[in-house]
Amino acid sequence: MTPASTSRPRVSPWVLSAFWFGSAFHWLLLLLILMPENVVTFVGEDRKGTFLGLLAGIGAVMALVLPPLVGAHSDRTGKRLPYLRMGLIVNLVGLAVMALAASTLGGMAGFWVYLLGFLLVQFGNNFATAPYSALIPELVAPGERGRYSGVMAMLQALGQLLGAVSAVVVGLLKLPVLVSFVLIALLLIGPALVTLRGVPEPDTVVTRPAGGPTMSWRQLFAHQPFLWVFVTRVLFSLGQYSVQPFLQYYNKDVLRQSDAGTSTSVMLLCIIVGSIASASLGGRISDRVGRKPVIYVAGTLMAAAALLLLVAPSFGAALALAGAFGLGFGAFTSVDWALGSDAMPSQSSYARDMGIWHVAFVAPQMSSAPQGALLDWGNAQGGNLGYTLVFGIAAVCFILGVILIRNVPDTRRAAAA
């Protein structure tokens, strides 16, 4: 059941999604640029894939457990924004610990301090995410969710674009690693304040069913729209995390780029420009024709690009494929949150259910540890076999996601009725 449209405030999609801009900048610069470089500094070249995968996998445990618990607590208190505020503070503390380790420590001792900081970052960011994620289904009418999801996707892409540009500038100027961590903190704080000051607390403006029933986890997954949205989101995330953490190593080992960090930033720029081009358009199209047709096209394009990267004859060709991947990724992201919001079955537990759905984003990060080991093992066999394996896994996951998304019932028109 949906609250009456008169009970929904008119919140700007740009203000509502501002936090995603800062979060996108944060995760792109941290996961794809800083962490691969820092891990090599701590453990060396021979074990880089294994320890980067370990770092991502351990961090994913935090992201797996926390959002459903915090989301359920947010539903009980009826508050969303205080969780965003507290999570932001813990996230900043974690960034400070990581910066300290990367700037002043070395060896395995430095790595474990770095890991501690990363756990704090994951705790803080995920503490904020589940209650914040509930704002889209709570404040946005079903017929507008595609547009709002598209704006969110565009802001995410713009945040990633700025992150990639910043990485290029920092790399070219040879600035200390501390500069990148300061940039992350500043770009996280600013957009978060926009959302905190511009979005009303939902419990004051949206009528919730007092004491309304909350579905058990079993009932939630028995709800077919939620089940298939969750499964397909896991598959797309698995595809993403099969490739994303290792892009910098791919640039160095396969494309033979002398400055792998800068080359990766340029490749990310191509992905992001492609995603910006398709993000807003995909969301608007999905409000008219449905979410699934957009995902069919997007997933197929992403799978094809992942496979063709394995045979890219040059860095220029790889950049063109990265742009094509970005077109698919932007279109997918533009409808992703709308599809998830449409699938929420109970108005009384939006934050908990969005927290559980968020598990589909982060649980696949745990595959980074075994895939990092697979990458190292395959490359040790020669011929860059490791990259063939992990990029091939990505393509298979994208195709399976496209196939299985057909099982998601189209609740959009029913909800809008």
Image (tube, rainbow, N blue to C red):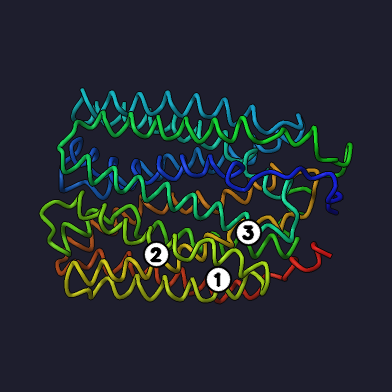
Disc 2 secondary structure class: helix
Give the tally of numbered discs.
Answer: 3
Q: In the rendered view, would you say 369 is above or below 26?
A: below
Q: Is residue 325 left or right of residue 386?
A: right
Say few, some or many: other residues with alpha carbon within 10 Å of mark 3 (under 14 / 14 to 19 / 20 or more): many
| Residue 147 - label | 3
Disc 3 secondary structure class: helix
Distance from Cα at disc 2 to Cα at disc 1: 16 Å
Q: Nearer the viewer, mark 2 or mark 1?
A: 2
The residue indicated by pointer 1 is 295
Q: Are marks 1 and 3 in contact (CB under 8 Å)?
A: no
Quadrant for residue 133, please give it.
top right
Quadrant for residue 107, please give it.
top left
The residue indicated by pointer 2 is 274
Amino acid bearing label 1? Ile
Residue shown at 83% from the left, 53% from the top? 2
Between discs 3 and 2, the one toward the N terminus: 3
Q: Are marks 2 and 1 in contact (CB under 8 Å)?
A: no
Q: Is residue 262 left or right of residue 354?
A: left
Q: Nearer the viewer, mark 1 or mark 3?
A: 3
Q: In the rendered view, would you say 329 is above or below 303?
A: above
